Image: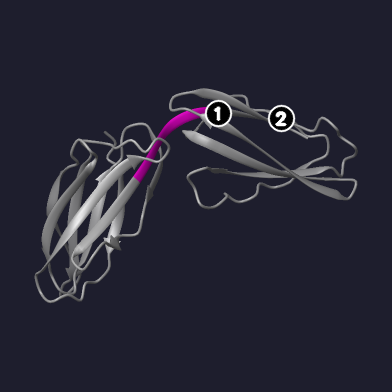
């Protein structure tokens, strides 16, 4: 298992000293919703010392068969706590929600992962008009809230085939591309379904 961690920070806690709180950690696949049992988790406390910050592991364990765990901790005033979960092997996407309250004494930390797939991207200006033709594109997964940034413009009679597969996350990868030709701008879209471990090709023909 990779020694790679996602971390949720509970900010400085202004509870009365040693206030007990209940925590709920979950880990699931972002695409399928399936839980990840057996992942290890760790809880670390940090606080300001006389000359430097101090750190102490105050809890650890593994997620149960449902990919979750409940526990209670007595929390120190003016301390911060981080919750980390080890990523599954062959992980290409990791995300965590903000730690959020689920009642007066309960907190929930949600971790999502997606495993790797492999993709070739082929791009062809099949209707080239002039060297001023321009095209740019961006992508996102259906489980992401925001698009990635636009690429730089591909100019003229652009023609490209990926020489090799590159590693991406599983899931539905959506593409949007913008074409400027003869002063006119058009926008197009498409998607490719990537199962974990699969090898796929996506083409942008414009």
Q: Is the Cβ of the residue at disc 2 closer than 8 Å to that at disc 1?
A: no
Of 179 and 191, which appears nearest the observer? Answer: 191
Q: Is residue 162 magenta?
A: no
Residue where numbered disc 1 is placed: 119
201 sits left or right of 14 in the view: right
Magenta residue span: 112-119
* Distance between mark 2 and mark 1 Cα atoms: 14 Å
Picture quarter with the C terminus: top right
Quarter residue 159 falls in: top right
Q: Which residue is drawn at 70% across and 43% down?
A: 177
Residue 146: percent from the left, percent from the top?
A: 54, 52
Residue 153: percent from the left, percent from the top?
A: 73, 46
Q: Looking at the rendered structure, which numbered label has been put on residue 19?
A: none
65 sits left or right of 181 in the view: left
Comes first in the chain, label 2 or label 1: 1
Q: Which residue is drawn at 46% across and 33% down?
A: 170
154 sits left or right of 162 in the view: right
Residue 173: percent from the left, percent from the top?
A: 55, 37
Element assignment for label 2: strand
Residue where numbered disc 2 is placed: 160
Vertical position of residue 13 compared to residue 146: above or below:
below
Element assignment for label 1: strand
- Label 1, residues with CA under 10 Å away: few <14, some 14-19, many ≥20: some
Magenta stretch prevailing secondary structure? strand
Residue 34: percent from the left, percent from the top?
A: 33, 35
Vertical position of residue 163 compared to residue 66: above or below:
above
Of 186 and 135, which appears nearest the observer? Answer: 186
């Amino acid at each position: 298992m990779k020694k790679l961690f996602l971390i949720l920070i509970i900010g400085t806690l202004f509870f009365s000293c040693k206030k007990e709180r209940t925590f709920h950690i979950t880990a699931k696949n972002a695409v399928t919703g399936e839980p990840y049992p057996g992942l290890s988790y760790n809880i670390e406390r940090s606080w300001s010392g006389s000359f430097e910050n101090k750190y102490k592991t105050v809890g650890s364990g593994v997620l149960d068969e449902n990919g979750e765990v409940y526990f209670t901790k007595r929390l120190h005033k003016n301390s911060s706590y981080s919750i980390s979960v080890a990523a599954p092997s062959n992980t290409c996407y990791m995300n965590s929600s903000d730690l959020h309250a689920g009642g007066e004494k309960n907190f929930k930390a949600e971790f999502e992962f997606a495993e790797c797939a492999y993709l070739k991207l082929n791009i062809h200006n099949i209707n080239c008009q002039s060297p001023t033709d321009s095209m740019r594109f961006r992508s996102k997964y259906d489980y992401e809230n925001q698009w990635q940034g636009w690429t730089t413009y591909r100019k003229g009679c652009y023609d490209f085939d990926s020489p090799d597969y590159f590693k991406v996350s599983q899931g539905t990868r959506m593409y949007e591309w913008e074409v400027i030709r003869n002063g006119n701008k058009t926008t197009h879209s498409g998607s490719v379904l990537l199962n974990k471990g699969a090898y796929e090709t996506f083409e942008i023909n414009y």
